[in-house]
Image: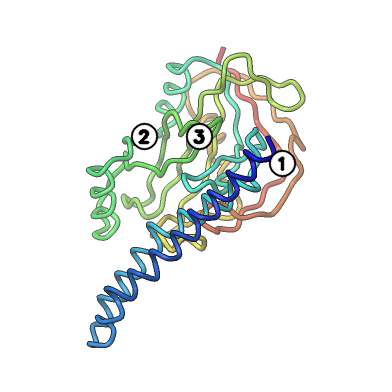
Amino acid sequence: MILIKFAHMIWRALRFMGIIIISYLVYILLLSDILTKGYHFAAYLAIWLFSAYLIAPKINRFISKHYLPNYFIGRSVTTDGLLGDPVNIAVTGSEENIKTLFLEAGWYLADDLNFKSSAKITMASLFKKTYPTAPVSSLYLFNDKQSFAFEKEINNNPRKRHHVRIWKTPINWYLPGGYKADWLCAATYDQKIGVSLYSGQITHKILANIDQERDFVLKTFAESSVLYQLNVVNNFTTGYHSKNGGGDKIYTDGALPFIDLN
């Protein structure tokens, strides 16, 4: 077993070194000549795209494999393996019930993330056009991306929006303390378009006070015609200050509301 683990460590180290070598070769063979000829803008653009969308994600995944626990800690995970948005709402009920709750509360079901929807939200954001069902990026919980998501855009512009990612919990699975829920949600508010601190990719930047967004979601539920029971568990987790997968500051008081639609 020790030899196998050692071999895996060597293999991961070699892959990491390979990425560095490939990056250096790309610079020597392609970019150095461009820079000497004065095509700086094109060179910088190529370096940014190559670094942000190829090299940085690989480095993040390599590092996160060595420190990120593979069990529930109340945080989602990005595709690069970084800690994402916190879980801040729990729901018990069927898929039909939870979708009815959000729709009755004035939310829109977000489109699936693909090339077409990505291009559409990019154009809508650039030209300030409405896109009420704009997609959200994929975050992972229980090693699965969100089952679906809901959103409310601000001023008919997807640059700013309320949005909630929702994951189906595994069968016979318990939250810490013995609590149960069929669905777990991560509600955050996109306040602007920006650049990820950890990768350099273009992304939404969220409001740090995620409790404010959690409470906003509950307020919309209260204004709907759907009947449910609400139980807020204070200090479910320790209140903390942290960052999400894009490097945005987040803080929470650790309370977790449980909504029972049954």
Q: As drawn, is 215 to the left or to the right of 53?
A: right
Where does label 2 land, which residue?
108
Q: Where is residue 251 in the image (x, y as percent from the top left)?
A: 66, 52
Q: Nearer the viewer, mark 3 or mark 2?
A: 2
Q: Which residue is drawn at 27% across and 57% down?
A: 128
Q: What residue type is labelled 2?
A: Tyr
Instruction: Give SS at disc 1.
Output: loop
Q: Where is residue 31 in the image (x, y as percent from the top left)?
A: 29, 76
Q: Which residue is drawn at 61% across and 40% down?
A: 75
**Residue 155, position in %: x, y?**
35, 52
Q: Which label number is shown at residue 254?
A: 1
Looking at the image, can residue 60 be seen?
yes
Query: Is there CB contact under 8 Å for labels 3 and 1?
Result: no
Disc 1 residue type (three-letter): Gly
The residues bearing labels 1 and 2 have C-alpha atoms spaced at a distance of 27 Å
Q: Badge 1: how crowded within 10 Å, few (<14), some, or many (20+)?
A: some
Indicate the amino acid at tag 3.
Thr
